[in-house]
């Protein structure tokens, strides 16, 4: 009996020892087991549906699962566990963005459409043209372009288009191009001025670099007279369409950037732009235009030529004679502003008929002589004596006729400028100025310009840049019915040099 009790007691003691050993082992393992890290919640936008939903706990990575197993079996296991911990920490560090030093603030460039609303590349004319510096930007004349180019034609009729202007893009201030306009080569603009079907036009970009030769592009055969059957109403020297011209007056210009105030609305800011245009034009006061008083003698009574040597060439005679024919025809149609108020109807009609016939004879005689050929003193005297007998009509047309004669000579042959006194030439500067100051204020009509606000409102302004606007300007031979023609292009097409995508509108 005692032996049985002893055996049972030994069993109980062994069991308790085993239990104590297991409990000790479990306590050690619990002390060494790493506490699980709390997973960082991913940032997410709050919404009405997800604001109250808790983020789900992320699934443990394989490395975390490995770390969760026992690493207390041996020193090797402990080393492995420590290496795994370092790898895990490095992996978590890569997940977190590294702190960076605050970057310097770089203001964003405005969008091209916004930038173009606060500037304009104006085409400032050189006057008189014979004093212009060497350049490759001008209205009218004939093209002189870099690289290979062909004269464009009307897509429907195959007839050549008329040349309007060319711009040497190297002369454009770099900042004015908005990072889109090419800074080399030339833009050349052609338009159908024969009143053919549609508004056919072409904008050419000829690529060229420093040293690329400039090559003339001669007018092709078949180029029609500019303005077709309306030539006699457009050109001051013409009485018939055949007496017009294929080539517009050539006037050199320089592209200049002006800054405009912050736009207050769509369209060209005429009043706000006047000050900028006047500043670009220069501080010099412009001489007043010619008037009837400039054809009075020293006593202010007689009718006298504006300077000794007038008319200087046969084109001047032709222009005065054509103007008298037009004025006689106008007076025949209406009695408003009657030049012969003291005559009865029959005598008035006879007087107008005589003026017209005599003016036509002088016109025909001038047309048969070289346009810029000199006139002998006796012929000049005879012409002025005849003109004086029709002073009632002549006084009305002389200021504009003399302006037209001087401009025609200057653009046709700038070296002929010596024919005119400087003080007379200066009286025409206002016709080629961006702006002028007068007693009534600053006169600054919308100028020819690129990458600028457009005149009037256009739906294209929301998506397109105004590549070029050309207002009506008789001094340049731009007769667009009193309105302006506008060439538009998207910023993307301009950046990609897709000038074939240009769109034309009229105001």
Image (cartoon, rainbow, N blue to C red):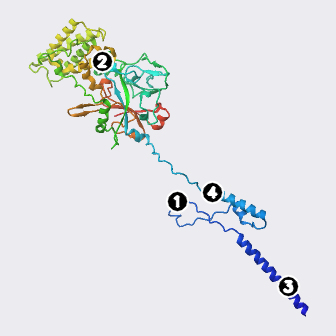
Residue occupied by mark 3:
11
Q: Which tag, 3 or 2, sits closer to the chain's start?
A: 3
Task: Identify the residue at image location x=27%, y=10%.
Answer: 366
Residue occupied by mark 2:
408
Residue occupied by mark 4:
93
**On the rendered image, what quadrant is the N terminus found in?**
bottom right
The residue lying furthest to the bottom in this view is 1
Q: Which residue is nearer to you in this view: 81 or 489?
A: 81
Residue occupied by mark 1:
45
Secondary element under disc 1, as helix, strand or loop, is: loop
- Total residue callouts: 4
Near mark 4 (Cα within 10 A), the count class, few <14, some 14-19 or many ≥20, is few
Task: Identify the residue at image location x=31%, y=9%.
Answer: 370
Secondary element under disc 4, as helix, strand or loop, is: helix
Q: Which tag, 1 or 2, sits closer to the chain's start?
A: 1
Q: Which residue is nearer to you in this view: 45 or 329?
A: 45
């Amino acid at each position: 009996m005692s032996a049985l009790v002893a055996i049972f007691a030994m069993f109980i003691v062994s069991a308790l020892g085993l239990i104590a050993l297991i409990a000790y082992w479990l306590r050690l393992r619990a002390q060494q087991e790493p506490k699980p890290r709390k997973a960082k919640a991913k940032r997410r936008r709050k919404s009405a549906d997800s604001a109250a939903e808790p983020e789900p706990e992320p699934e443990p990575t394989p490395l975390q699962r490995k770390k969760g197993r026992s690493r207390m079996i041996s020193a090797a296991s402990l080393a492995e566990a420590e290496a795994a911990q370092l790898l895990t920490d490095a992996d978590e560090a890569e997940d977190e963005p590294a702190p960076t030093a605050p970057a310097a603030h770089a203001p964003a460039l405005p969008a091209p459409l916004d930038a173009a609303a606060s500037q304009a590349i104006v085409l400032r004319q050189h006057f008189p043209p014979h004093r212009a510096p060497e350049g490759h930007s001008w209205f009218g004349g004939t093209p002189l372009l870099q690289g290979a180019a062909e004269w464009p034609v009307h897509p429907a009729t195959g007839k050549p288009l008329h040349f309007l202007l060319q711009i040497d893009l190297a002369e454009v201030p770099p900042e004015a191009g908005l990072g889109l306009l090419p800074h080399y080569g030339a833009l050349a603009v052609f338009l159908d001025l024969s009143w053919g079907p549609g508004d056919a036009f072409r904008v050419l970009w000829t690529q060229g670099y420093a040293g690329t030769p400039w090559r003339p592009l001669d007018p092709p055969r078949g180029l029609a007279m500019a303005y077709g059957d309306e030539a006699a109403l457009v050109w001051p020297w013409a009485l018939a369409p055949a007496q017009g011209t294929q080539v517009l007056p050539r006037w050199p210009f320089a592209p200049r950037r002006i800054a405009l105030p912050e736009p207050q609305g769509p369209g060209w800011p005429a009043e706000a732009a006047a000050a900028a245009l006047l500043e670009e034009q220069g501080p010099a006061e412009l001489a007043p235009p010619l008037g009837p008083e400039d054809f009075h003698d020293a006593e202010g009574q007689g009718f006298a030529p504006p300077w000794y040597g007038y008319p200087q060439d046969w084109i001047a005679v032709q222009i005065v004679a054509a103007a008298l024919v037009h004025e006689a025809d106008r007076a025949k149609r209406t009695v408003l502003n009657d030049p012969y108020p003291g005559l009865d109807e029959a005598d008035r009609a006879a007087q107008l008929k005589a003026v017209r016939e005599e003016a036509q004879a002088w016109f025909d005689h001038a047309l048969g002589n070289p346009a810029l050929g000199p006139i002998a003193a006796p012929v000049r005297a005879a012409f002025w004596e005849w003109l004086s007998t029709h002073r009632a009509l002549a006084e009305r047309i002389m200021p504009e006729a003399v302006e037209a004669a001087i401009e025609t000579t200057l653009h046709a042959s700038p070296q002929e400028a010596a024919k005119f006194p400087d003080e007379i030439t200066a009286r025409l500067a206002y016709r080629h100025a961006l702006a002028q100051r007068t007693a009534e204020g600053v006169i600054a009509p919308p100028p020819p310009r690129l990458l600028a606000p457009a005149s009037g409102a256009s739906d294209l302004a929301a998506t397109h840049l105004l590549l070029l606007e050309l207002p009506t300007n008789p001094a340049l031979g731009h007769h667009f019915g009193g309105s302006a023609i506008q060439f538009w292009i998207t910023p993307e097409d301009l950046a990609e040099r897709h000038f074939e995508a240009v769109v034309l509108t009229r105001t």
